[in-house]
Every structure is written in structure tokens, then in C-alpha cells.
């Protein structure tokens, strides 16, 4: 979704990427001081509220509804025609699509398992892998208590580095072997930081 000048593009919701879309959408709305309209903590004014208060709320509600509808596929937006507030839309979407997180997590893990560098350059391969890992972490957080999911994410960080190196093209075998055999004193602190490994890899190439 592209907004006014200075706005950012929010990941478009397609019915399968709820965790990633929700995460970025919340930040987008928070940056416009409209989160209370989205989550319902700023409800529709009472009947005896002033005309100015009612008008301000209606404008903000319409703004969030517009952002919501324009950041998703048309088929999904059409299903929201019966809702009159952004908060009701948000609750409906959360109840309907957050339940699909487990299925989506399986799809993401399958994509990760099948991801190889192929004909991509190293930077593009890294970006594609990190996009999948980011969504994977968000899905894990939504399915598992925060403390437990944080431990799992940290524990898997080193395996991400190994997966990244293992799936590089054969032409990089020599560089990969050199990196894997570097002393712990040189790369030990970076062992769980995939972006740092990428920088080192690119500096060697």
C-alpha cells in the first residue's frame, strides 16, 4: 500500500501472511498515532459527545479503515463490507487469520528447506532467506509464549548461518570452507549473526 508522500509501503495482506502483515501494519498505524482507533482503545464517542469529538473520531476511523482496505487483496477487503469501524475489522481479521498461523509456519519452513542460492547473487539470496526467517520468527512468536519463542529463535540462530553457507552455489565452496574453518577467536562472536557473516563473505569475494 502506498500512501501520501513520506509514507512507507506496508506488506500487502494476501490471506497467508497475517503475522508479517500484522507486525508491519501495527507499526505503520502507530507512527500515525492511530493505534487506539485500530485496537479499539479509543472507542466511538458517546452520543452526548461534542460534534468536534465525533467528527475527529469519524475521520480517524475512516483513515484507518482506508489503510486497512488498501493494504490487502481485493477479495479480502470485500469481505469486510459489513463492518463500520476499523477496530471491528481488525478483531475480525485477527480471529479469522491468526488461526492459520500453524499452517503458514509449515509453508515457510518448507520454503526455507527448499531455498538455495541458484542463479541469485549472494545479496539477493541472503535477502530472500532473511525474509522467510523474519516471517518464521513472527509466526513462532504468535504460536508460542514469548519467553519460550525467544529461546527457540536464539537457539536456531547458529543453524541459520550453517543453512545459508551450505546452500551457496558450488563456485563458492572454497570460500565457504575457509569461513567454516576459521578459528573461534575470529568468528566466534559472529556465529549467530547471519548479517555479519554476509559482510565477511562479500569482503572475501
Image (cartoon, rainbow, N blue to C red):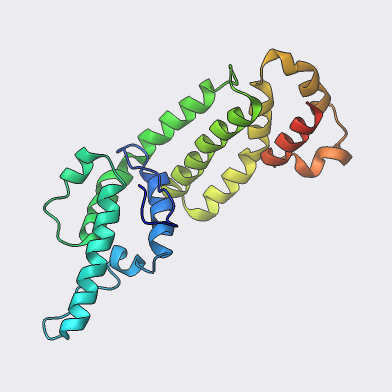
* Total labels drawn: 0
Residue at (67, 22) in percent of width and height:
166
70 w.r.t. 115: above or below:
below
Quarter assignment of residue 188: top right
168 w.r.t. 102: above or below:
above
With 37 as the anchor, is 134 left or right in this view? Answer: right
With 21 as the anchor, is 134 left or right in this view? Answer: right
Front residue (pair 141, 118): 118
- Percent coordinates x, y for residue 95 in the rendering: 26, 50
- Percent coordinates x, y for residue 147 in the rendering: 54, 55
Residue at (24, 75) in percent of width and height:
56
- Residue at the far top: name it: 170
200 w.r.t. 71: above or below:
above
Locate the C terminus and report the quarter of the image it occupies: top right
Quarter assignment of residue 31: bottom left
Front residue (pair 71, 89): 71
With 8 as the anchor, is 184 left or right in this view? Answer: right
- Percent coordinates x, y for residue 148 in the rendering: 53, 50
- Percent coordinates x, y for residue 13 in the rendering: 33, 42
Residue at (21, 59) in percent of width and height:
88
Residue at (12, 86) in percent of width and height:
48
Amino acid at each position: 500500500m502506498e500512501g501520501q508522500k513520506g509514507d512507507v509501503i506496508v506488506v500487502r495482506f494476501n490471506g497467508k501472511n497475517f503475522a508479517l502483515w500484522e507486525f508491519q501494519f501495527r507499526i505503520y498505524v502507530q507512527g500515525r498515532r492511530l493505534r487506539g482507533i485500530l485496537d479499539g482503545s479509543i472507542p466511538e464517542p458517546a452520543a452526548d459527545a461534542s460534534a468536534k469529538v465525533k467528527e475527529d473520531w469519524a475521520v480517524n476511523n475512516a483513515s484507518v479503515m482506508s489503510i486497512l482496505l488498501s493494504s490487502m487483496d481485493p477479495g479480502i477487503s470485500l469481505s469486510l463490507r459489513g463492518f463500520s469501524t476499523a477496530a471491528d475489522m481488525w478483531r475480525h481479521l485477527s480471529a479469522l487469520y491468526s488461526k492459520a498461523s500453524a499452517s503458514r509456519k509449515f509453508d515457510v519452513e518448507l520454503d526455507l528447506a527448499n531455498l538455495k542460492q541458484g542463479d541469485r547473487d549472494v545479496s539477493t539470496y541472503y535477502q530472500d532467506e532473511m525474509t522467510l526467517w523474519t516471517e518464521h520468527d513472527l509466526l513462532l512468536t504468535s504460536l508460542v509464549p514469548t519467553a519460550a519463542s525467544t529461546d527457540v529463535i536464539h537457539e536456531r540462530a547458529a543453524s541459520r548461518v550453517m543453512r545459508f553457507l551450505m546452500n551457496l552455489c558450488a563456485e563458492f565452496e572454497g570460500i565457504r570452507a575457509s569461513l567454516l574453518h576459521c578459528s573461534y577467536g575470529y568468528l566466534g562472536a559472529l556465529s549467530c549473526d547471519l548479517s555479519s557473516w554476509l559482510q565477511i563473505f562479500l569482503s572475501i569475494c
